[in-house]
Image (cartoon, rainbow, N blue to C red):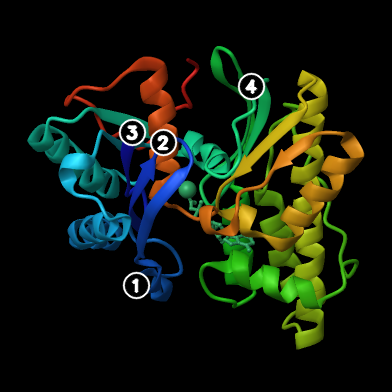
Amino acid sequence: MITLGIESSCDETSVAVLSGRQKLLSNVISSSIKMHQPFGGVVPEIASRHCLEAIQPVYKQALETAGITESQIDLIAVTHAPGLIGSLLVGLSFAKALSYALAKPLVGVHHLEAHLEANFIENRRPRQPFIGLIISGGHTTLLHHDEAGYHLMGETVDDAIGEAYDKSANLLGLGYPGGPMIDRLAQQGKPGLIRFTRPKIKGTFDFSFSGIKTAVRYYLRDHGPLNDSDLKDFCASFQGAVVDWVVRKAYDACDAKQCKYLVTGGGVMANSLMRQSLERESKKRGVRAFIPPMKFTTDNAAMIARRGLEVFLNRGPDDLSLRAQPSLAVAIA
Ligand code: KG4
Ligand code: ZN
């Protein structure tokens, strides 16, 4: 079974070819991130225009790299939610046209579910229930997955963790996207320069990241501008705090549901300390942590193909009335 995956929910346009569940034949990604940098964040109009220009050449290259022809495609999987509406519509319209022209089934994929599924390209999917942790520029979400599907356990009540990184990096004058910059500086600094207060939130498994951004602002007002050495130590303190909040909560969720598996995904899973801390805590708590390979942390179509196959095998195809939805909860079934 050959699955074509198509992803265009934000600033990346990607097409992948997956054979069976685990043999990835190609995964071509074109990013417009450089075009957004002067604006300090993703500009939806620029993102969708780039998707429109990129989709056809990226598709051609994905088939070429995989060494297949269009007629060998058995299933077309496409991100239909959540994301920027203009970007989503490009991939979805392309997928529908292809499905109609080739007379091949179409399946809509939820982008966040796909971030978790990225782990099951190189690893077998656990049969037992698991906890899903999604940390990205738009989401900070804890899910419980059982036989019935995904159930929401907690999410951010304000900013996403990646947003906290990006906004704080902006205040520090580090440019966009800020996550990788803070991560790099943090690795050269010593934590402990500043102790950030853990947010107090009502829901046990909810998160909050807007407070730390305000704390960064006040620290800079009172102590800025920082010299190189203090900047590195500051980044190390910031990173130490947010990683600790997320890691604890993720494993507490595993304890609460008595799950032996933690499946993680999203752009912030590229963070060095997050990866190390999740790994270390995994051994302590006796939970197996699935940490996606670096190449699957950012948006890619390989994860869409993998998730699409799973959804198709479970509930069959979608029809051409499938809609693009900027916000949509994860599927319960
Ligand atoms: O999943 P993603 O590619 O896009 C969204 O769906 O949001 O995530 C992008 C986010 C950005 O906020 C970026 O700053 C963050 O992931 N990020 C990182 C790192 N690499 C990317 N955050 C912390 N440390 C990193 N190494
Ligand atoms: Zn994403």
**Mark 4 CB near ligand 2 (8 Å cut):** no
Q: Position of residue 312 (x, y in %)?
A: 36, 24
Label 4: element kind: loop
The answer for how far apart the CA atoms under marks 1 and 4 are is: 42 Å
Q: Position of residue 162 (x, y in %)?
A: 59, 54
* Label 2 packing within 10 angstroms: few (<14), some (14-19), many (20+): some
* Label 4 packing within 10 angstroms: few (<14), some (14-19), many (20+): few
The answer for how far apart the CA atoms under marks 4 and 3 are is: 22 Å
The amino acid on which the numbered mark 3 sits, given as a three-letter code, is Met
Q: Do the residues under discs 3 and 2 have CB atoms within 8 angstroms?
A: yes
Label 1: element kind: helix
Q: Do the residues under discs 1 and 3 have CB atoms within 8 angstroms?
A: no
Q: Is residue 62 above or below residue 229?
A: above
The amino acid on which the numbered mark 2 sits, given as a three-letter code, is Gly
Using residue 287 as the reference point, say whether residue 206 is left or right of it. left
- Which residue is identified by label 3? 1
**Mark 1 CB near ligand 1 (8 Å cut):** no
Q: Which mark is residue 35?
A: 1
Using residue 266 as the reference point, say whether residue 19 is left or right of it. left
Identified at 64% across, 65% down, the residue is: 168
Discs 4/2, front: 2
**Is the N terminus in the top left, top right, bottom left or bottom right quadrant?**
top left
Q: Do the residues under discs 1 and 4 have CB atoms within 8 angstroms?
A: no
